[in-house]
Structures are given as structure tokens and as C-alpha cells.
Image (cartoon, grey):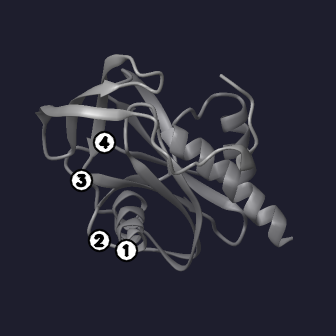
């Protein structure tokens, strides 16, 4: 491995060669495939990829007093409770803003008149192709909650600064929430 600058190499060149691919598992949300590959050094190997059938969406709602909302729920894969920004999945063929607006209403009952996309991210790019987007939602009004049947949610309204402290204290560990809250703080600071 060598240390390089951005000018030293072609970022569009893929050093992996795919020899074959096979879908090992799929459901309505994910597809897991195993690729037979030649790795960057030319050696044979396998690579497993989890392909997501939705875009990941996170929303940092912010009211005029500087408060945000967190959503709490038990996360099955982790076997623990998690506080997160409102989030969910959006169909690949649907505009991410439209899906984010739907998710915010479903999980919090909030509607926002002002939306700003503050982040594009990949959640775990060594194993999944999942692409995520985070929005700052402002000028809020309250409407009815519309949770999905698989969700047992708790809402918590708190100052954005406290939510950021929860990130810094590792009380919020979800990657989209961590990125979204820290990015929202930076965006708001830059606005002055």
C-alpha cells in the first residue's frame, strides 16, 4: 500500500475483477449476493454484497426554539434500544425528498415547510451498496402520527445541542443519526 494524493491515481479505475456472481438470499428489502473475484493484487476470492432495495433517509427536524425530535425503538439486529433521528427507507424510483417528507410524518406527525438536504452517505460501504440522504426539516407544524405496523416508537423532543451531546457520549450510535446530527449542527453554525 502506498500513500498517494488525489492526483496520483485514477479514482474511476476498478481494481477488482468479477468472475461470476450469484444471489444467495433476497427478500422485499435486501438482496445478498456472492461474487467470485480477482482481488486488486490478482488473487482469487469471494466478496459478499448486501444490496438494498430502498434509499436510506434520515431527517433532523428543527423547530424555531432549536429543538429536535428523536425516535426511540428496539433494534432487532442489535438486540438493544436505540435513539435515532426520524428515518426510514424510500423506494429507489421515488424522489428522496418526497420519501423523507413521508417518513417524517409517519414517525413524528410533523410537517415541514423548509427542507434542506445536508448529507449524502454510504452506511457501511465495505459490505453494502446502501446510499443514504439526510435532510434538515424546518418551519414545522404538527399533524397525526402514521407509524408502520412493525414500529413501536417513542418520541423525544429535546434541544439539538443535547442530541449532539448524546452523539458525543455514544448514547446515539446509529450511523445516519450521528452523521445527520453533527452535519445539522455544522450547517446551522455556518448559517450564523
Q: Nearer the viewer, residue 17 or 155?
A: 17
The residue located at (32%, 18%) in the rendering is 45
Q: Which residue is mark 1?
A: 98
Circle 4 residue? 152
Q: Position of residue 188 (x, y in %)?
A: 76, 65
Label 3 belongs to which residue? 148
Q: SS for tag 3?
A: loop
Residue 16 marker = none
Single out the mark in the foreground, 2 or 3.
Answer: 2
Which is more foreground, mark 1 or mark 2? 2
How many angstroms separate mark 1 from mark 3 (CA)? 17 Å
Image check: 79 left or right of 7? left
Front label number (1 vs 4): 1
In the rendered image, residue 178, in percent from the top left (x then y), is placed at 61, 42
Please tell me which of labels 1 and 3 falls first in the chain: 1
Horizontal and vertical percent for residue 176? 52, 45
> Which of the 4 image quadrants contains residue 108?
bottom left
Amino acid at each position: 500500500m502506498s500513500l498517494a494524493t488525489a492526483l496520483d491515481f485514477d479514482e474511476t479505475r476498478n481494481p477488482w475483477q468479477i468472475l461470476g456472481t450469484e444471489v444467495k438470499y433476497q427478500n422485499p428489502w435486501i438482496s445478498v449476493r456472492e461474487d467470485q473475484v480477482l482481488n486488486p493484487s490478482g488473487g482469487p476470492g469471494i466478496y459478499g454484497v448486501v444490496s438494498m432495495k430502498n434509499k436510506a433517509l434520515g431527517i433532523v427536524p428543527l423547530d424555531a426554539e432549536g429543538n429536535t425530535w428523536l425516535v426511540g425503538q428496539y433494534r432487532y439486529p442489535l438486540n438493544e434500544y436505540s435513539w435515532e433521528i426520524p428515518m426510514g427507507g424510500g423506494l429507489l424510483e421515488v424522489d428522496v425528498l418526497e420519501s423523507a417528507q413521508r417518513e417524517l410524518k409517519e414517525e413524528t406527525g410533523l410537517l415541514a415547510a423548509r427542507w434542506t438536504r445536508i448529507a449524502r452517505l454510504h452506511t457501511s460501504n465495505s459490505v453494502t451498496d446502501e446510499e443514504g440522504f439526510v435532510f434538515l426539516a424546518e418551519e414545522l407544524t404538527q399533524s397525526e402520527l402514521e407509524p408502520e405496523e412493525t414500529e413501536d416508537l417513542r418520541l423525544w423532543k429535546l434541544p439539538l445541542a443535547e442530541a449532539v451531546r448524546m452523539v458525543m457520549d455514544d448514547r446515539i450510535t446509529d450511523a445516519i443519526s450521528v452523521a445527520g446530527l453533527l452535519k445539522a449542527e455544522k450547517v446551522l453554525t455556518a448559517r450564523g
